Amino acid sequence: NNIEHMPDDFLPVMGKLSRRATGGGANDNVYIQGGHNCWGILLAPASGEAMADLIVLGKSRKVDLQPFRPSRYRNLKLFP
């Protein structure tokens, strides 16, 4: 088996998960950030700042996170 360390569209996954993706639980404040491939160490400061803005302010001040939204994977489920 070959396990890829990046999403199939080569973009990171960054954003708030839908209630469906978290298994429909009561907690709707679940965020994900990953899939940066080998660039993670270089992108970590900018990604971390963008995610902190998203969590605290509801949007990133410097980066459009729309292309990285987890919902682009319609069948994303973290929990069975």
Image (cartoon, helix red, strand yellow):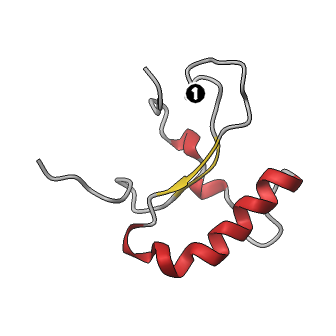
In the image, farthest residue toward the right: 57
Q: Is residue 64 visible?
A: no
> Furthest residue to the bottom?
42
From the top left corner, tell me how far across and down residue 35 is, in percent: 44, 59
**Residue 33, position in %: x, y?**
56, 55
| Quadrant that contains the C terminus | top left
Q: How many marks?
A: 1
* Residue position for label 1: 22
Q: Residues within 10 Å of mark 1 (few under 14, many from 20)?
A: some
Outermost left residue: 1
Relative to residue 31, is residue 34 drawn left or right? left
Callout 1, which amino acid? Thr
Q: Is residue 37 above or below residue 7?
A: below
Residue drawn at x 53%, y 43% is: 72
Residue 68 visible, this angle: yes
Q: Position of residue 60 (x, y in %)?
A: 79, 62
